[in-house]
C-alpha cells in the first residue's frame, strides 16, 4: 500500500462507498465528513506528460475514444467499457453486452487510472 493508495469500502447500511486515502479516511474539507458516493467508476485511459513546465510534471489522460471500465454500485462490480466521441459528449459506460450501465441515484466518483494499472476488489 502506498502513501496515496485509495480504498473504497462498501457500507451496506447506506448503500454507499466510503473513501480512504493512504490508509486513513478521506475527509471532505467542506463538510468534515468522509467522502462517499453511491457509484464508483474506474476508467482506464492512456496517459501522457503535459509538458507544461511544472516541476514533477502534470499528467494528461485521453478521455476521448473508448477504454476499459469498472463500475461499482450496490456492493457489486460491473466490468465494461467507457466511451466518449468528442470533448463535448458525456462519457457513457457500457457492460460487456454493450448495454449502457444505469447509474444509481446519488453521487458518482470517477477515478481515472493509467491503462495497465491493477485494481483489487
Image (cartoon, rainbow, N blue to C red):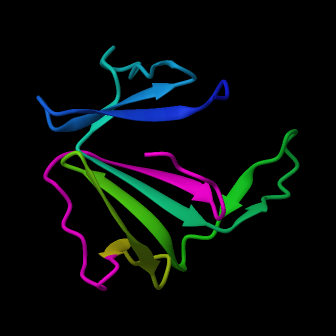
Residue 71 location, x and y as percent? 34, 58
**Residue sitting nearer the eye, 74 or 58:** 74
Query: Which residue is pictured at 13% across the width and 52% down the height?
Result: 105
Position of residue 48 measured from the top left corner of the image (x, y, whole percent): 77, 63
User: Is 30 positioned to the left or the right of 14 in the image?
Assistant: right
Residue found 50% across the figure and 46% down from its top: 120
**Quarter of image, res 88:** bottom left
**Would you say the magenta stretch is mainly helix, strand or loop?**
loop
Residue 114 location (% of width, % of height): 65, 59
Q: Residue at x 30, y 18 (%)?
A: 31
Write down the quadrant of residue 26 in the picture: top left
The residue under the point 18% across, 48% down is 74
User: In the image, is residue 89 above or below residue 21?
Assistant: below
Q: Quick check: 50 left or right of 43?
A: right
User: Dividing the image into 4 quarters, which one contains the N terminus?
Assistant: top right
81 vs 52, left or right, is left
In the displayed structure, would residue 15 be above or below residue 32?
Answer: below
Residue span colored magenta: 95-121
Quarter of the rendering containing residue 36:
top left
Please state the horizontal and vertical placement of residue 115, each as a whole percent of the image. 64, 65
Query: Which residue extends farthest front?
Result: 121
**Number of marks present in the image shown:** 0
Asked if the magenta segment contains residue 117, the reply would be yes
Amino acid at each position: 500500500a502506498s502513501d496515496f493508495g485509495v480504498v473504497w469500502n462498501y457500507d451496506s447500511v447506506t448503500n454507499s462507498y466510503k473513501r480512504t486515502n493512504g490508509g486513513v479516511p478521506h475527509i471532505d474539507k467542506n463538510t468534515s465528513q468522509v467522502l462517499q458516493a453511491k457509484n464508483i467508476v474506474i476508467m482506464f485511459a492512456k496517459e501522457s506528460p503535459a509538458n507544461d513546465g511544472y516541476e514533477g510534471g502534470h499528467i494528461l489522460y485521453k478521455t476521448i475514444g473508448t477504454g476499459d471500465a469498472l463500475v461499482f454500485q450496490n456492493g457489486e462490480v460491473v466490468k465494461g467499457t467507457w466511451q466518449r466521441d468528442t470533448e463535448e459528449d458525456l462519457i457513457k459506460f457500457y457492460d460487456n453486452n454493450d448495454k449502457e450501465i444505469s447509474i444509481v441515484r446519488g453521487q458518482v466518483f470517477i477515478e481515472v487510472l493509467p491503462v495497465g494499472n491493477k485494481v483489487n476488489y
